[in-house]
Amino acid sequence: MKIKEAAEKLNISARTIRFYEEKGLIKPDKQENNQYREFSEQNIWRLQTIIALREAGMAIGDIKQALEKIEHADKQELQYYLELQRSVLFSKWLEIKGIIETTDGMIESLKREQKLPLDNIYELAEGSKRLREQRNCWQDKWGFDRLAINHDERVHNDGLREYKDYEEALQLTVKWLNPALGEQGLDIGTGTGNLAGKLMERGAEMAGVDQSKEMLKRCLFKYPNMETKLGNFLALPYLESRFDFVVSSFAFHHLTDEQKVLAIHEMRRVLKPRGRICITDLMLSEKELETAESEGGLELPPSLMNLLQLLDELDYLTKHQQINGLLHIVYAVPIR
DNA sequence: CTTCTTACA
DNA sequence: TGTAAGCA
C-alpha cells in the first residue's frame, strides 16, 4: 500500500512516516519507475511498534536500537530497553508528583493567607526546578557499563585503595542491619549485587537499583531471585512504603551535596514508617577533612559529619563506625 | 490528485 | 513534526 493509505491506517501523517525512514527506523521498498514507497504488512507492523514505543515516550534513537533487539528476538536486551524506558517514565512521574505537591502547597497557603505568599512560591518553584535539572542531568556518567565486565575482579584486587576492607565493611553492614526473615530490602547502586547477596543469605528479600544495565545483568546472573531495576538515587523506581530497609555501598560519594539531600528523601519515600537506612561508603571524618583540605586533593570524598547532620535533621537516630581512613558505615533508624 | 525531495519554522 | 514549494 502507498504512504497515504498507511498513514491513515496508522493515524499518523505521511511526513512522520518519511521521517522515521529518514532516521533509519524503517526501509520500505520503492517502486522502480516513480520512487513511490510501498508498505508491506511487515512495514506496517514495524510502524505500529514504533508508534507504541513512541507513545511510551521513547526517543527515536532508542527505538531504533530496541527494534534491532526485537528483530533478533533478543528478549534480555529488549527487556532492558523497556526497563530503561520505565525508569525514564518513573522519573517523570516523580517530577510531576512533586509539582502537584508544590501546587497543593500554594493553594493551601493561598487559602490561609488570602494572598500570594510570593517568597514561598518562589522557593517552591525553585525547588521543583532543581529537582528537574538534577534528575535530567544524571545519566551514566561514570561509564559503569564498560566497567561491569570485570567489576568483581577489580574490587577484589584493588585491596589497598578505593575498595580497601571491602569484605569486612559489607559484613559489618549486614550485621548492623540484621535483617529478619522475609524483610524487604533495597540496595541502591547495587552493582553486581555483592551487598544484596549477603543480605539475602540472611533471609532478606532484596531489590537492587543501578544505573548500569550491564552491572544488573551480572547481578542477575549471580543472584537469579533478586529483583533488579534500572534507576538511581534521585528517582528510585518504586512506590511509597515499600521497603523495611535501604542500603547502599560505595555509591553515595558520587552525589553532590544537593543530590544527597534529595537522595535521603527518596530513600525515606520508599521506606516503610520504621524503615532503616545503612550507608557504607568513602567519607571523611573531621580529622581527615582538615588534612585532605590542606593537601588540596582534587576529588574530596564527602564529609561524614554532613551526612550525620542531614540524617539528624530528618529525625533519624544514627550510629557510625570508621572501618579505615576513608571507609565508614552509617546506620540510621527513625526516632518515631 | 498523489508522492517525492528539500528547506525551513 | 508541520508546512510549503517545485517537480514528475
Image: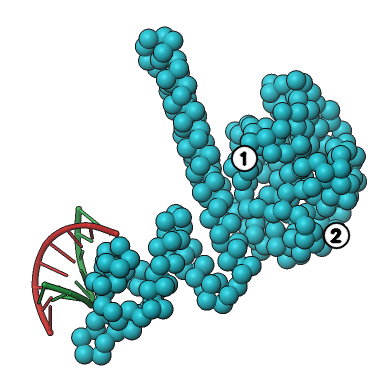
Chain colours: A cyan, B green, C red
Q: Residues within 10 Å of mark 2 (few under 14, many from 20)?
A: few
**Left or right position of A143 against C2:** right
Chain at numbered mark 2: A
**Callout 1 and callout 2 share a chain:** yes
Q: CA distance from mark 1 to mark 2?
A: 37 Å
Q: Secondary structure at mark 1?
A: loop
- The outermost residue toward the top is A113
Q: Earlier in the sequence, mark 1 or mark 2?
A: 2
Q: In the depicted view, which residue is nearer to us: A43 or A88? A: A43
Q: Quadrant of residue A275?
A: top right
Q: Residues within 10 Å of mark 1 (few under 14, many from 20)?
A: few
Chain at numbered mark 1: A
- The outermost residue toward the front is A9
Q: Secondary structure at mark 2?
A: helix
The location of residue A197, given as percent across then percent down, is: 83, 52
Three-letter amino acid code of the residue under disc 1: Leu
Asked if residue A295 shows in the view, the reply is no
Residue pointed to by mark 1: A239
Asked if residue A278 shows in the view, the reply is yes
Residue in the picture at 44% in, 26% down:
A103
Residue in the picture at 29% in, 84% down:
A30
The quadrant the C terminus of chain A occupies is top right
Label count reads 2
Q: In the depicted view, which residue is nearer to us: A195 or B3? A: B3
Residue A36 sits above or below residue A332 on the image: below
The quadrant the N terminus of chain A occupies is bottom left
Residue pointed to by mark 2: A157
Three-letter amino acid code of the residue under disc 2: Asn
Residue in the picture at 30% in, 63% down:
A12
The location of residue A230, given as percent across then percent down, is: 63, 53
The location of residue A88, given as percent across then percent down, is: 53, 50
